Image (cartoon, rainbow, N blue to C red):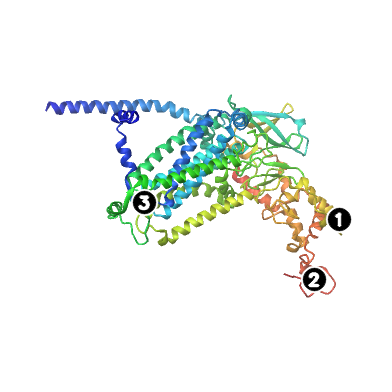
């Protein structure tokens, strides 16, 4: 009899020990998971986005598309050169701009602007975009990503801070499109119809 | 008793490992498995060991910081004695490892070794393949150059397409909102701690199961695997015609392992280390990123899939393939092992090999990519403007200035994105050319916004001259009948 009692007492302590370790592990798991997912939780909503300047309006001649460099607003000390980012700035006229991400809407390779042919071209999989960022040809399903912009005190500022990917923050996807941008597309029936359906989806 | 034997005995009295090791080494294997076809598993293990050693050596110098990784690789290449060679061995070792793991997998499948009772060995092998590919990708990231930077961007773009949680996966993968210091650090942790740790654990289990269950016997056509009888048959086989693994079969493994290490070293000596290419500076966009060799096929597939199929393909296909590989031993766990009686298995392996090979080859050439420097150096060759009018020559200038040759070749230079234009006038009439230039279509952007009417007229006039001397340009015969007062021409000038 006594033998059974000791066994159940030991068994009880063992179960208690397992329970105790389970509680400790759970308690420790909270900060571990919190640490592991900190890059996700911090970025909720517009957590990473802020307004950065691309330089004075006078840097961007009307009717031209220029490459502008800016420093990503979220910086870590070990980032090196990777925080320097570029964007294509198209000044339509006056304070009307379009600021495009260099990252192709297909898989993110850097698109280049070719003023002679009026196209953005991607070196990876052959995507091409018109001067207003709408899709011209190739694998991309949509136009270039646009940064929301505003002109303040003679400076062009954009809302940036996240790698533009097809699933990134909503602000990146829609952009602020000046109303006159649509005129450029009238000639190409195919392209403009594709683009308008895309905009409906995006907004 | 000599000194060494005494020391050995002292250790074994405490460790007690000699007996189990001897037992494992001398366990009987079917005689006909002492074959050159059975050396790929041990070769993969050998290359893995080479990777561990060279990886540790590289970690002595490499700095996993986005600001300094690239310079530390340059130091390895140029400042540290034989640093270039260790980098080259590690890089070539990675290529060899992926190749050998794939060959091992094909051999195992064709010899029916995934069937009962070795299902779990196969499943662990599938995970080992995935981990090997994970090591290859994360290793490419650690070579923190332009290809690595934009390769991460491609990875992020693919991950972001996952419904709902896509953006969260991207931030988890990058360790922040952009590709930066935290990204490199976490890929370093994956490449150096997480995946190798898992690899070692899985390799140990994989090898342990080969020892416990016995090496797959040479498949004989007609010798059918049945769950009820197989194990007894296998034991009878090893008893009747078995031989100790050491030394009966192991010498072939040893020779092949040595040969593979020599081959890696030879490639490293001859070809040198991989990169690093340009600095990982996102402001340098004059770059055409390419993945490493073993992901080239994917790069090709992503260029050629119709846009609408791409997201489903990227998200569903990997899951289907992995699930298919895992379920394979359950779907065909019994029956014939010999490839001679399994034509569909043989055809499947051949088909996969041909698909991967074709896409890899296509991606090496990348005909879909615009040639972004074709226009700058190359004027329209002289022979295309012999005996042309002023308008046609003006068109040749437009052709040159508007970078048509980024995508179209003329006289064998230029991109292959669009069709070659040497004989475009045979295919399209003047009206069709105008429509194509202004409105685009197919894969061509519309140039209506970017060409004045005069430029379009001149360009099309030039394009209409592009036909072989022996072939007349395309002509809309109905147009003559409608527009002209003269008699309708009867004969069609079409020639082969």
Q: Quadrant of residue B470?
A: bottom right
Whichever of callouts 2 and 3 sits on the residue coming sooner in the sequence is: 3
User: Could you say which disc has been placed on residue B216 in the image?
Assistant: 3
The chain carrying label 3 is: B
Residue drawn at x 31%, y 54% as measured from the top left: B241
Q: Check contact, mark 2 vs mark 1: CB within 8 A.
A: no
Q: Residues within 10 Å of mark 1 (few under 14, many from 20)?
A: some
Residue drawn at x 29%, y 32% as measured from the top left: B16
On the image, the x and y values in percent for residue B310 come to 56, 49
Q: Is disc 2 placed on a helix, strand or loop? A: helix
Residue tagged by mark 2? Answer: B481
Whichever of callouts 2 and 1 sits on the residue coming sooner in the sequence is: 1
On the image, the x and y values in percent for residue A185 come to 72, 48
Q: CA distance from mark 3 to mark 1?
A: 76 Å
The chain carrying label 1 is: B
- Which residue of the protein is positioned furthest toward the left in this rendering? A1
Does residue A77 appear left or right of residue B119 in this picture?
A: right
The chain carrying label 2 is: B
On the image, the x and y values in percent for residue B127 come to 43, 43
Q: Is disc 1 placed on a helix, strand or loop? A: helix
Does residue B220 appear left or right of residue B261 in this picture?
A: left
Q: CA distance from mark 2 to mark 1?
A: 26 Å
Q: Nearer the viewer, mark 2 or mark 3?
A: 3
Q: CA distance from mark 2 to mark 3?
A: 78 Å
């Amino acid at each position: 009899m006594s033998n059974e009692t000791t066994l159940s007492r030991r068994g009880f302590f063992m179960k208690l020990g397992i329970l105790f370790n389970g509680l400790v592990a759970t308690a420790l798991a909270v900060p571990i998971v919190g640490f592991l997912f900190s890059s996700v939780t911090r970025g909720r909503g517009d957590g990473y986005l802020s307004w950065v300047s691309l330089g004075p309006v006078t840097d961007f001649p009307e009717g031209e598309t220029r490459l502008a460099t800016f420093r990503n607003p979220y910086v870590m000390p070990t980032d090196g050169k990777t925080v320097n980012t570029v964007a294509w700035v198209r000044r339509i006229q006056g304070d009307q701009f379009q600021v495009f991400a260099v990252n192709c809407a297909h898989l993110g390779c850097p698109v280049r602007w070719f003023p002679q042919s009026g196209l953005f071209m991607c070196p990876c999989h052959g995507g091409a975009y018109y001067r207003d960022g709408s899709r011209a040809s190739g694998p991309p399903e949509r136009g270039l990503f646009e940064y929301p912009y505003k002109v303040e005190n003679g400076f062009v500022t954009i809302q940036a801070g996240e790698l533009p990917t097809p699933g990134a923050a909503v602000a990146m996807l829609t952009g602020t499109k000046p109303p006159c941008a649509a005129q450029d597309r009238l000639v190409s029936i195919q392209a403009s119809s594709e683009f308008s359906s895309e905009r409906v989806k995006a907004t | 008793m000599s000194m060494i034997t005494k020391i050995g005995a002292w250790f074994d009295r405490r460790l007690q490992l000699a007996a189990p090791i001897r037992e494992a080494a001398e366990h009987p294997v079917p005689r006909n498995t002492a074959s050159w076809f059975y050396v790929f598993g041990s070769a993969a293990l050998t290359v893995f060991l080479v990777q561990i050693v060279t990886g540790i050596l590289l970690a002595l110098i490499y700095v996993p910081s986005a600001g300094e990784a690239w310079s530390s690789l340059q130091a390895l290449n140029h400042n540290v004695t034989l640093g270039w060679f260790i980098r080259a061995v590690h890089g070539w070792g990675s290529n060899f490892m992926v190749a050998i793991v794939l060959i091992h997998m094909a051999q195992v499948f064709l010899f029916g070794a995934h069937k009962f009772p070795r299902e779990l060995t196969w499943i662990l092998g599938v995970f080992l393949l995935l981990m090997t590919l994970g090591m290859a990708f994360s290793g490419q990231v650690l070579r923190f150059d332009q290809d690595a930077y934009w390769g991460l961007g491609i990875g992020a773009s693919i991950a972001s397409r996952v419904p709902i949680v896509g953006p969260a996966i991207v931030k988890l993968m990058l360790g922040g909102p952009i590709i930066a210091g935290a990204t490199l650090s976490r890929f370093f942790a994956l490449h150096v701690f997480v995946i190798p740790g898992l690899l070692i654990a899985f390799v140990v289990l994989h090898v342990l199961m080969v020892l416990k269950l016995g090496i797959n016997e040479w498949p004989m056509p007609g010798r059918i695997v049945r769950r009820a009888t197989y194990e007894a048959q296998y034991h009878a086989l090893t008893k009747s015609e078995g031989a100790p693994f050491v030394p009966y079969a192991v010498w072939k493994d040893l020779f092949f392992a040595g040969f593979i290490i020599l081959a890696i070293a030879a490639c490293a000596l001859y070809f040198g280390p991989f990169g690093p290419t340009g600095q990982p500076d996102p402001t340098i966009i004059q770059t055409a990123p390419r993945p490493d060799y073993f992901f080239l096929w994917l790069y090709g597939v992503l260029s050629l899939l119709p846009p609408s199929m791409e997201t489903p393909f990227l998200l569903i296909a990997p899951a289907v393939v992995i699930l298919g590989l895992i379920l394979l031993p359950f779907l065909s766990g019994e029956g014939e092992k010999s490839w001679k009686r399994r034509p569909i298995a043989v055809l499947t392996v051949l088909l996969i090999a041909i698909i991967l090979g074709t896409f890899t080859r296509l991606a090496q050439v990348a005909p879909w990519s615009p040639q972004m420097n074709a226009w700058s150096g190359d004027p329209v060759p002289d022979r295309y403007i012999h005996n042309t009018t002023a308008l046609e020559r003006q068109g040749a200038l437009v052709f040159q200035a508007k970078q048509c040759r980024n995508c179209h070749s003329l006289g064998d230079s230029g991109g292959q994105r669009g069709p070659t234009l040497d004989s475009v006038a045979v295919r399209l009439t003047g009206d069709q050319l105008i429509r194509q230039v202004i409105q685009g279509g197919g894969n061509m952007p519309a140039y209506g916004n970017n060409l004045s009417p005069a430029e379009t007229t001149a360009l099309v006039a030039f394009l209409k001259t592009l036909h072989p001397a022996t072939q007349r340009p395309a002509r809309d015969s109905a147009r003559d009948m409608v527009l002209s007062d003269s008699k309708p021409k009867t004969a069609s000038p079409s020639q082969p």
